[in-house]
Image: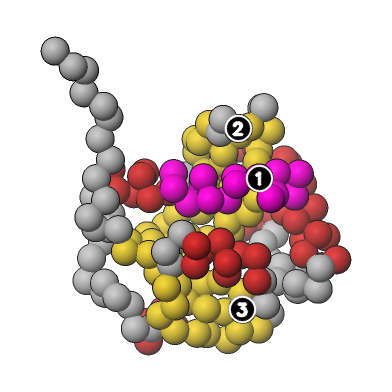
């Protein structure tokens, strides 16, 4: 499946809200009460778009995955045992795969894209808080090399502070042969 990544634009807002709504319904049906009508809400998504921090991955013209990259984090991040505390990093927020695209590798492809994008910008690590009662997300992050650096209690429960350090990854395009 080909996925085209780009920054979200204001006309994406309704579709982003629909993806979140359906993802919340699916998580709720599985007993994963991570998100609700309070978070993430329309105003938060709109703010993400306006700040140029929301990215979408499209497959077949539809938003298959969405995520935010920025430097905003809760104060509790300061108490985590980060592997690479002093390297340039970004925080991943509101990572969501449309339920119609779940189970076919879209999340993993998006994480690979995020690493490539950040590496090209000279960023060497990505951090995230992952809901401790979402085994599917935790498994995906662990499979992609994320490690736990601490925990934090948020409104919905315990979250794992996770990090992936990728300083040594080099992304280059193939060079033509002589």
What residue is shown with label 2? 1
Disc 3, SS: loop
Say left or right for 128 vs 123. Answer: right
Where residue 156 sits in the image (x, y, percent)?
68, 80
Say left or right for 146 vs 2. Answer: left
What residue is shown with label 1? 104
Mark pair 2, 1: CA separation:
9 Å
Choose the circle earlier in sequence order: 2 or 3: 2
- Taking depth in this image into account, of 28 and 135 the one nearest to the observer is 135
The residue most toward the left is: 178
Q: Find the magenta span and give its range.
A: 98-113
Q: Which mark is residue 132?
A: 3
Disc 2, SS: loop
Mark closer to the observer (2, 3):
2
Taking 157 as reference, is 170 above or below it?
above
> Mark 1 and mark 2 in contact (Cβ < 8 Å)?
yes
Picture quadrant of residue 165: bottom left
């Amino acid at each position: 499946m080909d996925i085209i990544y780009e920054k979200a634009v204001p006309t994406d807002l309704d579709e982003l809200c629909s993806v979140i709504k359906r993802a919340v319904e699916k998580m709720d049906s599985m007993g994963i009460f991570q998100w609700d009508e309070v978070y993430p809400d329309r105003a938060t998504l709109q703010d993400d778009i306006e700040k140029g921090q929301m990215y979408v991955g499209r497959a077949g013209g539809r938003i298959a995955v969405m995520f935010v990259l920025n430097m905003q984090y809760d104060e509790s991040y300061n108490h985590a045992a980060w592997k690479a505390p002093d390297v340039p990093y970004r925080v991943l927020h509101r990572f969501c795969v449309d339920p119609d695209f779940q189970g076919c590798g879209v999340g993993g492809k998006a994480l690979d894209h995020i690493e490539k994008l950040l590496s090209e910008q000279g960023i060497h690590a990505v951090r995230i808080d992952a809901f401790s009662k979402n085994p599917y997300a935790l498994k995906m992050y662990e499979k992609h090399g994320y490690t736990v650096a601490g925990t934090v209690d948020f409104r919905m429960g315990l979250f794992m502070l996770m990090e992936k350090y990728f300083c040594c990854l080099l992304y280059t395009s193939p060079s033509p042969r002589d």
